[in-house]
Image (tube, rainbow, N blue to C red):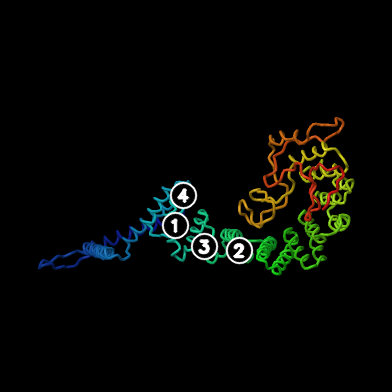
Amino acid sequence: MLWSLIKVMIFIALVAALTYGAGWLMQTEGGIQVTVAGTEYTLGPLQSVIAAVVIVVGVWLLLKLAGFLVATIRFINGDETAISRYFDRNRERKGYKALSEGMMALASGEGQLAMTKAAKAERFLNRSDLTDLMTAQAAEMVGDRKKAEEVYKRLVQDDKTRFVGVRGIMKQRLSEGDTETARQLAEKAIALRPRHEETQDTLLRLQAQANDWAGARKTLATKLKTGTLPRDVHKRRDAVLALSEAKGVLDEGKSIEAQEAAIAANKASPDLIPAACMAARSYIAKGNKRHATRILTKAWQVHPHPDLAAAFAEIEPDETPEARLKRFVALTKHYPESAETRLVKAELHIAAEDFPGARRALGDLPDKAPDARALTLMAAIERGEGASDTVVKGWLARALTAPRGPAWVCDNCHNIQGEWTPVCTNCQSFDTLSWKTPPHADMANATGVAMLPLIVGALEDKGAAAPAPVAPRPTTPPSEPEVMDAEIVETDDAPVTVATSDEPAGESAKT
């Protein structure tokens, strides 16, 4: 309010001053005499002031016109002027508008429109680093791979966009199945930007698929150094790679290097079952049974596993079943209630022809967690105790349709593998195999249901209480052999494998 009052007072003072000045000039005698072309002009004081103002305004207009003419000449010559800046701003505004519309079109899946807007933005902005990537992505969206590759190659030529170009061509080669070229491009991309996590993972996966274990370990070290991988995960995965490298050395016949690599992998990650088994076998080859026993026992304390039991049996391959049963106490005393421990103890008792002991070792496992292995062992126990063929076949019928039990299952695609590998054979994921019970579909197995009467046969003894088959389950994968009319066989790796036999009841099962 006060400021408004001050401004009004200033305005009134100026008007009063001008009025006073004009009145004073009108009362003043004299003036200015101007002669133009022999004609003399006399101007009074007020007229002189007006003439001076007109002259000043005319000179200002003349200077502005001269400046405009000079700017026009410079504009024509290509120099930057106010006029050129005006047109540049106008082009820039149109270019960024086209770029924004192209990004929206790309996000909404309109590839052709995005390419059109990108071309328009390039025409107005002349910034290929901003529009080339949009053009490449839009070309891939509409299926024009040749156009996309041309743009990516242009991006490679500029230092600022070289990584983007290399990564784009790498993805194209991956989609085409050219993994070798993609791996080389991934290595170049990592050299340009070592901290890019997605490219690190891609390179690691490609190196694992190509069995380049040494290169994969370097990439893993880079991930740890750049902070894109926790130290504990790095420790396990480095052990996986070391184990894979040891297998490769073993395939080449270099046993000493393989043994050292396997032992190093086991030390890096004692809970890695394949590493423990390979390290134990390397000690067995050296005759160091004590170290082999310690490695397998330590791994069993982390996770009981049949591969560990098989390697433990290889420590003394020629021992009697009774001696083996006694020696396995060092292993089975850990986690005595786990399913794997009970199954191994049952197999050992069956091999020693102690069928009541085998039944005690299994306990309620065939009822609470019936899988093919537990039910097959029950068939062997019934056979060893002299049960009829109907009872034995009844257990085998249940084993045929029962879940297969734990296996190596990929955490990513749930693919089931017979043996551990560092890379899933189905989805090519690295270090995703876990020993667990695979999921199974709750759907009826018509083939298995139809075969049950043929397997069990007619009940010869009405009083015999054969176990009733469980509800139909999916059949086991083709890699799992069907349990039918086989014999009790001998194995050196695992304590025993059992199936039906036509031999008299009580026939001994050997390891």
Marks 4 and 3 sit apart, C-alpha to C-alpha, by 22 Å
Image location (x, y in percent) of residue 302:
78, 57
Q: Nearer the viewer, mark 3 or mark 2?
A: 2
Is residue 45 at least partly visible in the picture?
A: no
- Whether residues under marks 1 and 3 lie with C-beta atoms below 8 angstroms apart, the answer is no
Q: Which residue is mark 2?
A: 212
Q: Nearer the viewer, mark 4 or mark 2?
A: 2
Image position of 446 (left or right of 51): right
Q: Which is more N-terminal, label 2 or label 4?
A: 4
Image position of 323 (left or right of 73): right
Image location (x, y in percent) of residue 219:
61, 64
Marks 2 and 1 sit apart, C-alpha to C-alpha, by 28 Å
As shown in the figure, which amino acid type bears the numbered disc 2? Asp
Q: Secondary structure at mark 3?
A: helix
- Quadrant assignment, res 448: top right
As shown in the figure, which amino acid type bears the numbered disc 1? Glu
Image location (x, y in percent) of residue 198:
57, 58
Q: Which residue is mark 4?
A: 141
Q: Which is more N-terminal, label 3 or label 4?
A: 4
**Residue 455's disc number:** none
Q: Nearer the viewer, mark 4 or mark 3?
A: 3
Q: Count neighbours of disc 3 (C-alpha within 10 A) and say few if under 14, some if 14 to 19, many if 20 or more.
A: many
Q: Which is more N-terminal, label 1 or label 2?
A: 1
Image position of 157 (left or right of 244): left
Q: Which residue is mark 3?
A: 185
Q: Which is more N-terminal, label 2 or label 3?
A: 3
Q: Which residue is mark 1?
A: 149
Q: Which is more N-terminal, label 3 or label 1?
A: 1
